[in-house]
Image: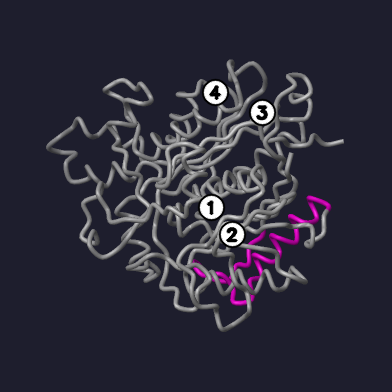
Amino acid sequence: MKNRVAITGMGIISSIGLTVEENFQSLLSKKHGISTIDFIDTIHKKEILVGEIKTSNETLQHLLNLPENNTFTRTGLLGAYAAKQAIQNANILDVNEVRTGFISSTSVAGMDFTEKHYKQYEQHPEYTKYIESHNAGDTSNKIAEYLGVKGFVTTISTACSSAANAIMLGATMIENGYLDRVIVGGTDALSKFTINGFKTLMILSDTYNTPFDQNRKGLNLGEAAAYLVLESDEMIQKDQKKVLAYVAGYGNANDAYHQTASSENGEGAYLAMKLAFEKASILPDAIDYVNVHGTATPNNDLSEGRAMERIFAKTPMFSSTKAYTGHTLAAAAAIEAVYSILAMQNSVVFPTLNFSTPMEEFQLIPETEVISKPIQYVLSNSFGFGGNCSTLIFEKA
């Protein structure tokens, strides 16, 4: 019999809060974190809005007690800050007491620093130390070293589904007895590279993003980090630990339709949800709330909506929280995993901000107010470039 996967800790930093509680209060009060750019010197500064965390790298280094000569980039700083919270929340005193892994996801990695100093390397050799921080694996290794994790460490980078896949891999390793405990999640900082890339794709909004709205214009990029601590049933029984929620099911599929767009009928999304239901051994009508991927791009919301119409006989209450935080790329699924757990713990559905006009293609209308209701199961979708579609199902503890 495979181990049940319990969630015993969580940590987060986003544009709407530096802790789980701050994020929760922002969600309840409909306080978004979308603003103009302060920390990146880009020609698009006045053209777009982003979910930027208004905490400097220097402040983050101080909060983490890092030495002055460290080579952490902003992505690593955000990740270490959130992962440390998760470990503390899980009341872990010795991170290597049992077989513990660290599975992190990122798409930006260290490019926020390497792009900043790219033209200065020859004149300022002191900046060359950041070159080794460019790759995604270096970010994960630095966070793992900061946490003291000496076991299994790996990185997943599948664009916007990355953190969902990190959670899936961690759950799989616990279920099959490879690990007793694993810290899973993702981190991404804003960078010129992603701003320019999404600008080129013409899917950035010049105003607040409006998920599932007929007049949606595109997404707001964001930066954030979030991590969960997953533990086996055996660990829970041994230590009599408090369980926040369970990873009940998950699925990953690829519709292989386009490099950046999802298929028009949402095939990948549909298959990912179908696999997640099979894994959880529940029917679609058991879902009480869906945290949709909901990026507010014309393509995603249409594709995801059609997939939901296919999988659900009656679509459950749903909302997109990206209107609060912006689209945090590889970290998005971990951010929304924390929000899904908060929804179950507090029996509340979080609203979709900025919605006004239903899409003409179907009659799916997201929740726009805070709604109190018992929630046993939450389904959370995350879809990445290249058609990499992932679905997580969380169960109330």
What is the spatial separation of the Cα atoms under label 4 and label 2, in whole angstroms? 29 Å
The segment highlighted magenta reads 253-281
On whether residue 256 falls in the magenta region, the answer is yes
Give the residue displayed 49% in from the left and 64% down from the top: 295
What is the spatial separation of the Cα atoms under label 2 and label 1, in whole angstroms? 7 Å
Element on which disc 4 rests: loop
Callout 1 amino acid: Thr
What is the spatial separation of the Cα atoms under label 1 and label 4, in whole angstroms? 23 Å
On whether residue 194 falls in the magenta region, the answer is no
Q: Position of residue 326 (x, y in %)?
A: 43, 56
What is the spatial separation of the Cα atoms under label 3 and label 4, in whole angstroms? 11 Å
Element on which disc 1 rests: loop
Is the C-beta separation of discs 2 and 1 under 8 Å? yes
Is the C-beta separation of discs 2 and 3 under 8 Å? no
Give the residue displayed 37% in from the left and 68% down from the top: 205
Label placed on residue 149:
4
Q: Quadrant of residue 128?
A: top left
Is the C-beta separation of discs 3 and 4 under 8 Å? no
Q: Earlier in the sequence, mark 4 or mark 2?
A: 4
**Circle 2 is placed at which residue position?**
388
Label placed on residue 309:
none
